[in-house]
Amino acid sequence: MSHVVSIQTELRDLQAIKSACHRLGFTFHENRATYKWYGRWVDDYHQEDAAYRHGIKPEDYGKCDHAISVPGAEYEIGLVKHHDHYLMVFDFIDAKLNQALGGQGAGRFLQAYAVEKAKQEAQRHGYACTETHLQDGSIKLQIQETY
Amino acid sequence: MRVIEVTVAADGSSRVETKGYAGADCQQASRFVEAALGRRSTEQLTADYYTTPTTQAQEAHQ
């Protein structure tokens, strides 16, 4: 080992987002300006990850730059452009949506995105990449130069 | 064998580790993956970072 870095995944690449959707069986709706949610803000959620705490006004809930729908879920995910990346905004009261995303933190989707993005970058730089699924739910990629 | 390992946890956070690189080469080697994935939260330099590929050549000249 010579160097270890921890990274907080950010959704910066639309192509990788599309690949993550495909990987998980979700549907990506490019340039769709609205996503389905309860429809009316009832001022009942104020945790750190509440959308309004990240620059999205309650009157703009339901609006987005792109949308994602999930099989079996009524509500959808909105992708909202925020500086150099997208925020995922969704009403987690939909249990099927919540489960498909891996909880309120959308861990399952972020994992799929990070894997697809890393594979994409490896390929772009001419590296070989192998994927292994670990018992704790992590996914390990080994990226090597090809000679 | 030089390898860049990316481990993505179930919560979506990533850990990028270089193996087999010596000296500052390790930081350069994995930079493209780190920058692509998101925001760096921590960095740890391990013993291999402090060796240099030119050590043997320097010893020969002495």
Image (cartoon, grey):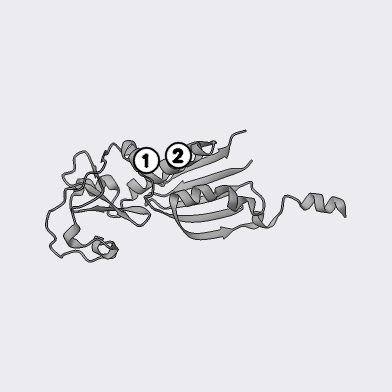
Which residue has dot 1 on it? A15
The percent coordinates of residue A63 (x first, y second) are 20, 52
Q: Point out residue A26 in the picture as x, y percentages from the top left corner.
A: 27, 39
Q: Residue furthest right?
A: B62
The one of B12 and B57 positioned closer to us in this rendering = B57
Task: Estimate the x, y position of residue B29 in percent, counting from the top left.
Answer: 58, 47
Which secondary structure lies at badge 1?
helix
Q: Is residue A6 above or below residue A123?
A: below
Earlier sequence position, callout 2 versus callout 1: 1
- Left or right, B1 with respect to B61, comes to left
Identified at 20% across, 64% down, the residue is A45
Disc 2, SS = helix
Residue situated furthest top in the rendering: A147
* CA gap, disc 2 and disc 1: 9 Å
Q: Is residue A86 above or below residue A57?
A: above
Task: Please state if B35 lies on the left or on the right of A75 as rendered.
Answer: right
Question: What amino acid type is highlighted by mark number 2?
Answer: Gln
Crowding at mark 1 (Cα within 10 Å: few <14, some 14-19, many 20+):
few
Q: Quadrant of the C terminus of chain A?
A: top right
Which residue type carries mark 1?
A: Gln
Circle 2/circle 1 CB separation < 8 Å: yes
Subunit under mark 1: A
Q: Where's residue A25, x and y in %?
A: 28, 36
Q: Is residue A1 visible?
A: no
Q: Is disc 1 on the same chain as disc 2?
A: yes
Question: Is A18 placed left or right of B7 in the picture?
Answer: left
Give the crowd class for mark 2: few <14, some 14-19, many >=20 residues within 10 Å: some
Identity of the residue drawn at 88% across and 55% down: B62
Q: Which residue is mark 2?
A: A120
Q: Residue at x 19, y 40 (%)?
A: A72
Vertical comparison of A28 with A95: above or below: above
**Foreground pick, A126 / B45:** A126
